[in-house]
Image: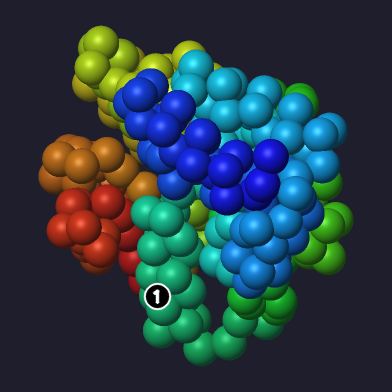
């Protein structure tokens, strides 16, 4: 079978299964171990039987709901490649915007990045922590997660990207509190989906991505409430706090931050799709 014939088969098969038909190209490019330019230049070449077999198996897996990123084992984030598996949430473009805006804000709030301490809470794949360290090498970055296998994958991503990060296992801010650590910057993309939303969400997400990284109580705000109880113990007098939030949750999260830190400047930032996706608190 020619490469283009395999691609046509995959597109039709995925379309019939109500999946993204473009996923076939990503999968075939992965199994052929080619850049997109090389892949497109080889569309009329014969496909090796073993590659075809792996490809067809992967296409059927995606048709069954398995995300492409879990099949190929990686996802791009802020121009870098991160390993992913079903122990971690797949990094999203919205979280890239959290990182970008955090960098803009810390540049304004702090005159020098030297010696600044930052923590990424619930690090998952390590995308936020690793990216912040590489974009702002002067930061001292700590990353936490409650689940051991998740933390191990984050460590591998830090090593792969040559980012020096301290990893601590524990529930939310517990490992920072127990170590009596205080920070200038706290960032987090915590679980924020209301549990009732599972009824209408795609099975690509609900059957494969870890529920502990997605759902947070009846209204999705459980983790933010816990943050408010624990944050005062771990932040310095001048600090930046940044959360990713679910669309429509910014008002509630802003209110929680204002109640906890009455002196803070709290701001909602909308993502590229016009959704209220980030809430920052500047404490000065």
Q: Residue at x 69, y 40 (%)?
A: 1
Exactly how many numbered labels are in the figure? 1
- What is the basis of the colouring in this image? rainbow
Q: Can residue 263 be seen in this view?
A: no
Above or below, 74 relative to 111: above
Q: Is residue 91 visible?
A: yes
Q: Is 50 on the left-hand or right-hand side of 84? A: right
Asked whether, in this view, residue 240 is left or right of residue 88, the answer is left
x%, y% of residue 127? 61, 53
| Quarter occupied by residue 33 | bottom right
Q: Image height check: is 206 above or below 81?
A: above
Q: What element carries label 1?
A: helix
Which residue is painted at 57% across and 50% down in the image?
4
How far across and how far down the image is residue 130, in percent? 68, 59
Percent of width and height locating residue 146: 65, 26
Q: Where is residue 208 in the image (x, y as percent from the top left)?
A: 53, 20
Q: Is residue 193 left or right of residue 81?
A: left
Tell me which residue sits at (51%, 88%) in the image. Answer: 111
Q: In this view, does 59 lie above or below 195?
A: below
Which of the 4 image quarters holds residue 60?
A: top right
Name the residue that disc number 1 marks: 105
The residue shown at (58%, 87%) is: 112
Q: Quadrant of residue 284?
A: bottom left
Q: Nearer the viewer, residue 47 or 172?
A: 47
In front of the other: 207 or 220: 207
Task: Count residues near mark 1 (Cα–Cα under 10 Å), then give few for <14, some for 14-19, many for 20+.
Answer: some
């Amino acid at each position: 079978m020619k490469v283009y014939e395999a691609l046509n088969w995959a597109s039709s098969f995925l379309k019939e299964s109500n999946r993204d038909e473009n996923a076939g190209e990503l999968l075939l490019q992965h199994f052929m171990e080619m850049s997109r330019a090389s892949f497109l230049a080889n569309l009329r070449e014969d496909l090796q039987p073993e590659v075809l077999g792996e490809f067809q198996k992967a296409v059927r897996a995606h048709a069954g709901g398995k995300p492409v990123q879990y099949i190929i084992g990686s996802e791009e984030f802020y121009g870098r490649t991160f390993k992913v598996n079903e122990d971690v949430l797949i990094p999203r473009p919205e979280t890239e915007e959290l990182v970008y805006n955090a960098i803009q804000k810390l540049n304004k709030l702090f005159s020098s990045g030297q010696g600044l301490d930052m923590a990424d809470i619930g690090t998952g794949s390590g995308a936020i922590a690793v990216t912040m360290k590489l974009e702002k090498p002067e930061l001292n970055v700590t990353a936490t997660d409650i689940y051991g296998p998740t933390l191990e994958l984050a460590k591998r991503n830090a090593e792969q990207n040559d980012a020096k990060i301290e990893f601590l296992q524990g529930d939310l801010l517990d490992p920072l509190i127990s170590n009596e650590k205080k920070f200038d910057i706290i960032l987090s993309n915590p679980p924020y989906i209301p549990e009732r939303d599972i009824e209408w969400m795609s099975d690509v997400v609900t059957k494969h991505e870890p529920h502990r990284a997605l759902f947070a109580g009846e209204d999705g705000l459980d983790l933010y409430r816990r943050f408010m109880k624990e944050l005062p113990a771990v932040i310095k007098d001048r600090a930046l706090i940044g959360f990713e939030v679910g669309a429509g949750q910014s008002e509630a999260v802003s209110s929680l931050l204002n109640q906890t830190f009455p002196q803070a400047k709290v701001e909602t930032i909308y993502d590229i799709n016009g959704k209220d996706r980030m809430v920052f608190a500047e404490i000065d």
